[in-house]
Each structure stands twice: as C-alpha cells, then as structure tokens.
Image (cartoon, rainbow, N blue to C red):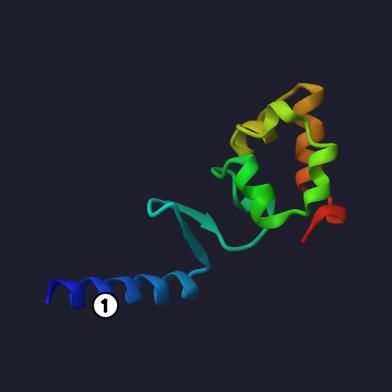
Amino acid sequence: MKFIKNILLLSIIIILSQNINIVIVNNNSLYAADCVAKNNLQENAMSFIARCRKGSIKSVFPGEMYSKNISEIKKGKSKAHKTAWKLLNDNRFKK
C-alpha cells in the first residue's frame, strides 16, 4: 500500500511540475524548465551549461566560474564574471 501511495505522489509531482514549468533536479532542487540564465539564478553554472548549452562553450568559458551559482556570476564585477555571464546568454551556444 505504501508503494502505491509513493507512486501516486510522484505522479502528482510530475504532473504539477509540467503545469507550472519547473524541473526537479537531485530530488531537492528546483530550477526553471527554460534555458534562460536569469530564470535559473540558483543553479550551478556547470549544471546549467550541461543542461542548456553546447559543449563548445567549454573552450571559452572561464574555468573558475564553473562551480559558482549563476546569481554570483551575474553580480560579479571581474572580467571573468562578465565573460561568463555573456557566454551564458549568448545564442551561439544554445542547444
């Protein structure tokens, strides 16, 4: 009986996530289903790139920015922050 309740609960979560346009990642993180950087500020740059950008971005993306949240990149003042933000929003690298 508990197994059936869990399946029903999971089904409801999936249906709701499709209707309100969110994605469940790692069982406890929620991200926007779209691939717009400003809508995914809490996501790690590496996971956003893997999900939404072509692999060719890795040749120009600043390595020290991979582990930062997109919100940190957006707020940053250094050249690396500015470059990373531009690349995350560059249409050339969209999947």
Task: Examine the image and state in which quarter residue 80 appears.
Answer: top right
Q: Is residue 14 left or right of residue 58?
A: left
Instruction: Please tell me which residue lies in front, 15 or 6.
Output: 6
Image point (41%, 72%), residue name: 14
Residue 66: where, in percent of width, then height?
Answer: 66, 34
Residue name at image x 79 percent, y 58 percent: 94
**69 and 7: which is toward the camera:** 7
Q: Residue at x 59, y 44 (%)?
A: 41
Q: Which residue is mark 1?
A: 8
Dividing the image into 4 quarters, which one contains the C terminus? bottom right
Q: Residues within 10 Å of mark 1 (few under 14, many from 20)?
A: few
Q: Amino acid at mark 1?
A: Leu
Tell me if residue 50 comes above or below residue 74 in the rendering.
Answer: below
* Secondary element type, mark 1: helix
Looking at the image, residue 19 sits to the left or right of residue 36; the answer is left
Position of residue 19 relative to residue 54, above or below, is: below
- Image coordinates of residue 48 in percent, x first then y, are 64, 49
Pick out the residue farthest to the top. Answer: 78
Q: Residue furthest left?
A: 1
Q: Please determine whether, in this image, residue 9 is positioned above or below residue 68.
A: below
| Relative height, residue 88 to residue 5 (above, below) | above
The count of marks equals 1
